[in-house]
Image (cartoon, rainbow, N blue to C red):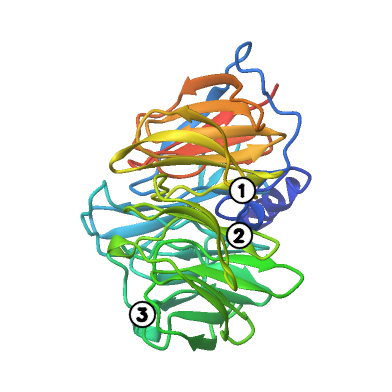
Amino acid sequence: MKFLILLALLTAGAAAAEWPDIMGPKRRGHSSETGWNKDWNNKEPVVLWKVQTGLGASSCVVSGGLVYTMSGSRDGTESVICLTADAGKQVWRQTYNCDFDARMWQGGTSTTPVLDGDRLYSMSFRGQLFCWNAATGEKRWELDLALKFKGIQPHWGWGGSPLVVGNMIVIEPGGNGSSRAAVDKMTGRVFWQSGSDPAAYASPILFANAAMRGVALFNASGLVGINPRNGTELFRYEWKTANDVNASIPVHRDGRFFLGSAYGKGIAVVQPDSGVIWEDTKIFLQLQSPVLHGDHLYFVAGDNSNRAALQCREWATGKVAWTQPLPGNRGQLIVADNHLIVFSEKGELILCSASPGSYNEAGRVHVLSGPAWAAPALSDQRLFLRDNSGALVCLDMRP
């Protein structure tokens, strides 16, 4: 009976815009939600519920009335968590051994789980790849990137979320001969492994244009395009940073890619076969992911040494349309119904128009104490936000 109830929850919300992956469907930061409250000056969004999950910067994924995230703990464990979206009640929690590693922030998980039908895939800080039954939390299979592929853990742990491609999961062990790999999403059986680039922290994306289609990886060496059928390399564009930190998700359009990093590297739109289209070496994206809306890019610039700023730039030329200072040094954003939902590192939520004409704010509310590095998730007129300490809130976005 319990299984049937949970299965009903998974399917009941099919009409609502779902958020099944990091940065939403296709990892583009776009929600198809409409009709939600966009007039915060008259009606601020209110907290429906708040829970404590555990340490980390894992974002939420949402489907069928359930919300999923991950967390770490200083007792040497990590968890994958499933909650009801309407009340924040725990449906299931799977906890496993995962050695804690004190880092420059609170610590904990930095990957986001991925939903694919009735299965949930997650990658731990230590490179443990799991497949779970999304309704019940039953473990279907697991494999260890270090043991199976001789993968080499990046300095701050594995940070890229696994990518579902057809019947496979594409991952980045980062080993010599196993820079990238693909496994059967139903069984975990290895299809192929290839390459020798060290892993970084960005999540891979699917891309397609008139010339080719494939998977783009933003690893420690730079941007690498691969054929997901066999792992063969399609192109390569060198983009190296100090400490091998490439962490923001690339954006693709018509064979060109937007890349951004910190540590003095900057931002650029590049075409792998011909080079730089435009660049700016004074703007940095440390771990923030950009969003392309229309013909303009929107992102929160900033890093350890530079204050955060929300910026709009023309995709084709890099021309700055406008810039707006934000609290803290970092922040994340998504776009929905021609509006930006911006979540600053300090836990402040800001709503503004996704328009290149000017910065036009529609309201702001302080939600969490921060620091907060996870991107917002919007589904069924609910907004899910969390900070690095593990506080997770659900805001009512009904008009």
Q: In which quarter of the image is residue 346?
A: top left
* Residue that numbered label 1 is attached to: 317
**In which quarter of the view is residue 327 placed?**
top left
> Measuring 63% from the left and 11% from the top, which residue is drawn there?
42
Cα separation, mark 1 vs mark 2, equals 36 Å
Front residue (pair 83, 158): 158
In the picture of the structure, the residue carrying the numbered disc 2 is 115
**What amino acid is at disc 1?**
Thr
Q: Name the residue under label 3.
A: 151
Residue type (three-letter) at the residue carrying disc 3: Gly
Residue 283, placed above or below residue 214? above
Residue 137's place in the image compared with 85, above or below, is below
Q: At x 44% / y 58%, what residue is drawn?
A: 111
Q: Give x and y (percent) for residue 152.
A: 32, 77
Side (left or right) of 170 relative to 30: left
* 2 vs 396, nearest the viewer: 396
Please name the residue shown 60% across and 26% down the image: 352
CA–CA distance between discs 3 and 2? 24 Å
